[in-house]
Amino acid sequence: MFEKGLIYRATRLVNWSCALKTALSDLEVEHLELDGPTKLAVPGHDPNKKYEFGTLTHFTYKIKGTNETIEVATTRLETMLGDVAVAVHPDDDRYKHLHGKELEHPFVKGRTMRIVTDAITVKMEFGTGAVKITPAHDPNDYACGKRHELEFINVFDEDGKINHHGGEAFEGLPRFEARVQIYKALEKLGHIKGKTPNPMRLGRCSKSNDIIEPYLKPQWYVDCKDMAKRSVDAVKNKELKIVPESHERTWYHWLENIQDWCISRQLWWGHRIPVYLVTIPGVVDHPDVNNHDHYVVGRNAEEAR
């Protein structure tokens, strides 16, 4: 499959289990439907404590050099530590005077933040019409970050604790404990505007019950587009028959919306991929796991050599 160009390595957002410290495929993610505010225990956190999900937290950022603020809302307050922008709709008259203006991050000194215009990310009629952008921790924000050439700042370690990019006050805290402490700190600064119920679909790791984090990391992928198209065509052309026929709809829904399959794992679960990280004295003395060119694919170690 590698020789056919179907397997490749790319850095993109993956389903990350902080409890297992590995990427997961979409099939290994279970979804919990929340009607509104819900308290849940989370692996890697205080076992005697539960954390709130299913709410939108509303808070403000200050426009640099002024007394004006702009309000945003999020279900994942801890990711504000990685915010690099606030997006508004280019046609929204409320914010036209703020286009391109810089913002002050309350906890990370020296962080460059600005207001960008984005008609894809922002719906003027939803909420305040202003959206916080965390490119390294959200799929929509990732796409927005690419469009506007924003910085991608990962504020979590692989175990889900806040790293040095998240500011000294929160470094080392488990991510949902950081959520609680960030709320308190924002409230103290007068930035909190309140909370509202928010029905949501929460992804969980099927093996550990951990809350799935979108995490920016290089992984190996299978290009599924051609295989999915051939599978769809086989049913449409009656080469393949789905029984009962009512399940054809599920078949089409899954395959017509297919994403490339993340096949690499950071844990060995019984299967091994014949990919070798190469050291060549004097050329590649310290191979980089994030560098595609430092890997070789072979059926065995001898072929790889």
Image (cartoon, rainbow, N blue to C red):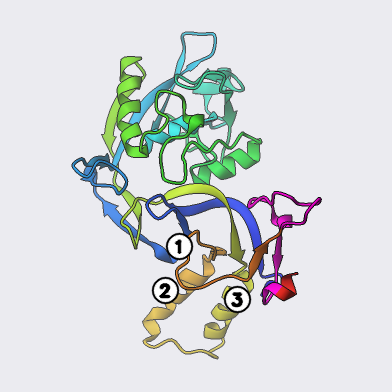
> What is the crowding at mark 2: few (fewer than 14 residues within 10 Å), some, or many (at least 20)?
few
On screen, 212 above or below 232? above
Nearer to the camera, 139 or 167: 167
Image location of residue 173, percent across then percent down: 36, 34
Residue type pointed to by label 2 = Thr
Report the Cα–Cα distance between label 3 and label 1: 17 Å
Which residue is outermost to the right? 282
Q: Is residue 124 left or right of residue 192?
A: right
Nearer to the camera, 119 or 271: 271
Q: Is residue 218 left or right of residue 297?
A: left
* First of labels 3, 1 by sequence position: 1
Residue type pointed to by label 1 = Asp
Provide the major secondary structure of the magenta segment.
loop
Q: Secondary structure at mark 1?
A: helix
On screen, 172 above or below 244? above
Marks 2 and 3: which is nearer the front? 3
Residue type pointed to by label 3 = Met
Image location of residue 5, percent across then percent down: 71, 70
Residue tagged 3: 227
Which residue is outermost to the front? 281
Report the Cα–Cα distance between label 2 and label 3: 17 Å
Marks 3 and 1: which is nearer the front? 1
At a point 64% along the width and 50% down the height, the residue shown is: 290
Q: In this picture, which residue range is highlighted in magenta?
A: 279-301
Residue tagged 2: 250
Residue tagged 1: 26
* First of labels 1, 2 by sequence position: 1
Residue 299: image quadrant is: bottom right
